[in-house]
Amino acid sequence: MLCIGRHPMMRFPLLFVPRSHLVVYRLQQTRFPLPILATSRDQRTAALRYASTRLCNDDRLFYISTPIFYVNASPHLGHLYSAVLADCMHRYKLLQGFNSKFSTGTDEHGLKIQQAAEAAGKDPLTFCTDVSERFNNLFRSCNISYTDYIRTTEKRHRWAVEHFWSVLRRKGLIYKGSYEGWYSTQDESFLMPSQVGDAVDSLGKEIKVSLESGHKVEWMKEENYMFRLSLFRSQLLDWLRGHPKAVQPERFYQAVLQWLQEDLPDLSVSRQRSRLHWGIPVPGDAEQTIYVWLDALVNYLTVAGYPDKHEQWWNVAHHIVGKDILKFHAIYWPSFLLGAGLPLPKTIHVHSHWTVDAKKMSKSLGNVVDPLERSQIFTTDGMRYFLLRQGVPDSDCDYTDDKVSKLLNAELADSLGGLLNRCTAPALNPAQVYPSFCTLSFPSDAGGRAVVEDYHMLDAVKSLPAVVKQHYESLHVYKALEAITACVRQTNGFVQRHTPWKLDRRDSKDQRWLDTIIHVSLECLRIYGTLLQPVVPEISSKLLSRLGVQPSERSWAALSFLPRYQDRDCPFEGRALGSDSGVLFSRMESQNVDKQKTKTTKKAAKLK
């Protein structure tokens, strides 16, 4: 019997019983009948089409969620990465005019929490509240603009879980059974014999351990409730084949299809209350507690308003998850939803993990990165930019402080910041205005002072919003930032190529060309600043304010590039620039970074 272990960002244990272990497994069937399921592929497809593609009344609604994070330890870099990805998507949708809901929060039930609270001499709720606040503080500090912070200890969530359980039970999808097998308390998971090995503890005593985590396991026998997952394999395959973008990126979609090539065993969905009392009791059975991973998954419905007013938001739900919890979100969660007669998520976006100096983050190695500390050193927007610029969903990404400094210096301080500083400096722009564009100097065809590379730059910037939109939609934010950075380089090249500081202001033609160079460069900067808002909101706001762009002129609809080039009016031409609030982004000098790290470490030590 197997219970999948935990993900570093979110613990979701799972029990299943393979057919080869039926000797140990004894079911006690209940009087509840099996649900009537569509048997033909056409019937199943029709049912799934209804379940997963029902349109909401308002097609401008969007709902994005992170996993909820387990409160067994303080937040790390991976938690922040999930949150920043979701925040980027949320802000992008708001720019497009959507009414967007964005949820995150904490998973607070389970045996480990129960034991950790006892060890700390606190009641479980106080213990959970303390750790949950650390996550909330990190997210607030890093400009995570969630609209709902859900905790599984809230009353609204308990009501949602109890209702969801009752629906599945009424439909005959939950029944009582008994099982026995190896169990890891630390991982809160059951394991198959093949996942258990021999070891010796600190006292020299022979013990059994999980081969995956190294934690001690014990043989246990228990009666609990099971969910009929085995009934849903065909429906899941139909859903995925009919919706090839339901799980992204492609490699994770293929992984889910591969898992579904084998039969799905039924799942344990409760624990005996004598063992686990820190959780939601099974409705109608005071001796059982709903298993923490089922409890946790329902949080997405709780935020949507389940069970009373959820349809509007649940029809537009999208999840962001780490790769280690993909199976729970792409197999078990859809099965629960199908069983309850609810629509399936529109998209499950999956991301990989972060290593440090090419090694897995581990307390024993002492290389766990504190995201709050690093955001204070590299700034909030600096950390957001690094994570989204370097984070590749398909593969694990590596973190070092040196990488952060080099990237931020090159792309934010030097390239983007340098361009803004050049074009708004009094030396080149003494009037401090958005200067005029001269169609004679930069005509739509050849004949002016522009060269072929300049026209290539205009084409690239004009198409940039469509490119960025495509990558934001698929959460390949790093590709969007690659495209923006490439255009910033082109614009810097444009200014460097024409050396406007060498032009003679006393010559009217030179003055018109100088104004045109600055106008084109400011227009490029306006596009970059608008597109970067979901990634670096503070830097973008500072840039756009310096250009004199008003808040009402920063939406996706305002991304009309260089209208004067097409003989249309430009609302910014002749407008005064905003006040100079200093450099856009200060360079990170390694000496200063080391000093700041020492100061932050000492401060943290005092707090302990």
Image (tube, rainbow, N blue to C red):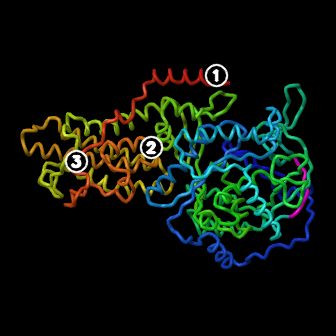
The residue at which mark 2 appears reads as 536
Dots 2 and 3: beta carbons under 8 Å? Answer: no
What is the span of residues highlighted in magenta in the rendered image?
175-181
Q: Secondary structure at mark 2?
A: loop
Q: Is residue 580 left or right of residue 284?
A: left
Q: Secondary structure at mark 3?
A: helix
Q: Secondary structure at mark 1?
A: helix
Q: Is residue 434 left or right of residue 543?
A: left
The residue at which mark 1 appears reads as 605
Q: Position of residue 259 (x, y in %)?
A: 69, 58
Say which label, 1 or 2, has the lower sequence index: 2
Q: Write down the quadrant of residue 584 in the picture.
A: top left
Q: Position of residue 283 (x, y in %)?
A: 84, 60
Please name the amino acid that badge 2 sits on: Val
Q: Nearer the viewer, residue 220 or 440?
A: 440
Q: Is residue 14 left or right of residue 508?
A: right
As measured in the structure, the alpha-carbon distance from the residue carrying label 2 to the one carrying label 3 is: 24 Å
Q: Position of residue 127 (x, y in %)?
A: 75, 38
What is the number of the mark on residue 519?
3
Quarter of the image for the C terminus: give it: top right
Please name the amino acid that badge 1 sits on: Ala
